[in-house]
Amino acid sequence: MHKLAAEALGTFWLVFGGCGSAVLAAAFPELGIGFQGVALAFGLTVLTMVYAVGPISGGHFNPAVSLGLAIGGRFSWSELIPYWVAQVVGGFVAAGILYLIASGKADWTAGGFASNGYGANSPGGYSLFACFLIEVVLTAGFLLVILGATSPKAPAGFAGIAIGLALTLIHLVSIPVTNTSVNPARSTAVAFFAETGAVGQLWLFWVAPLIGAALGAAIWKAVFAPVTDLPLEGNVAGKAA
């Protein structure tokens, strides 16, 4: 239960901080945060929680990360579904609180509510295929960073920084395309509060990140794991704590 509570808290922080920066701050151009600020906010949520609760749960905060770590031999398959449930619940609670705060402004409308989408719901109007492909590629890259940064041969204590900056980079690349998911729990949490039909497109933001995570983990396990001799730890933050 300590692990699941840590995962729920970490995912709560990711959704509340990352999506909150988009819903509350980026909505006002005069504040100057822009999508670059949103990208940084997402990276900071992961960076801070990896150090805060990563030593308890491993600091996944993302169903795709949990799947990738299981495939990569770093996480127990028996814990996968409980982690997914905790992550989705934590995200939903964050989105609900964020909605209550945002709706406290008299003229506010939910609109996209930081949700992900393709076609008409893509910030740049990108096609389903383009959105699917970028989510797969970026999630695979994210898993490669995570597995590399937490390997025994990586410099100790820096994993959280590498992972947080990787997520920032991912958002800088893909916010115009999908509004950036690479995290099914993050996408699910806000979709049900959006007014754009985001729930109908939610399938892509489960399928693509999970495929990407599996691909990234398979590449790591086949190409790099024999060199780094990775143990079964299930701990994203093992080198951060």
Image: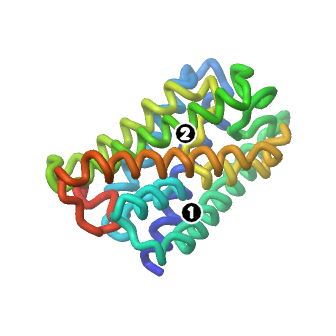
* Mark 1, secondary structure of its residue: helix
- In contact (CB < 8 Å): disc 2 and disc 1: no
How many C-alpha atoms fall within 10 Å of the one at disc 1: few (<14), some, or many (≥20)?
Answer: many
Compared to residue 87, the image places residue 37 above or below, namely above
Q: Viewer-proximal residue, 33 or 187?
A: 187
Asked if residue 177 lies left or right of residue 113, the reply is left
Q: Residue at image x 43%, y 78%?
A: 2
Q: Viewer-proximal residue, 39 or 29?
A: 39
Asked if residue 196 lies left or right of residue 238, the reply is right
Position in image of residue 180 (x %, y %): 59, 35
**In this figure, which colouring scheme has been used for the structure?**
rainbow
Question: Given the image, on which type of amino acid does mark 1 rest?
Answer: Gln
Asked if residue 112 lies left or right of residue 178, the reply is right
Q: Residue at image x 64%, y 51%?
A: 206
Position in image of residue 163 (x %, y %): 35, 44
Compared to residue 190, the image places residue 78 above or below, namely below
Question: Given the image, on which type of amino acid does mark 2 rest?
Answer: Val
Q: Viewer-proximal residue, 229 or 56?
A: 229
Task: Indicate which disc residue 87 carries.
Answer: 1
Which mark is nearer the camera, 2 or 1? 2
Task: Indicate which disc residue 136 carries.
Answer: 2
Position in image of residue 23 (x %, y %): 67, 37
How many C-alpha atoms fall within 10 Å of the one at disc 2: few (<14), some, or many (≥20)?
Answer: many
* Mark 2, secondary structure of its residue: helix
Give the alpha-carbon distance from disc 2 to disc 1, as whole Å: 20 Å
Task: Indicate which disc residue 19 carries.
Answer: none
Q: Residue at image x 22%, y 56%?
A: 239
Q: Residue at image x 25%, y 47%?
A: 224
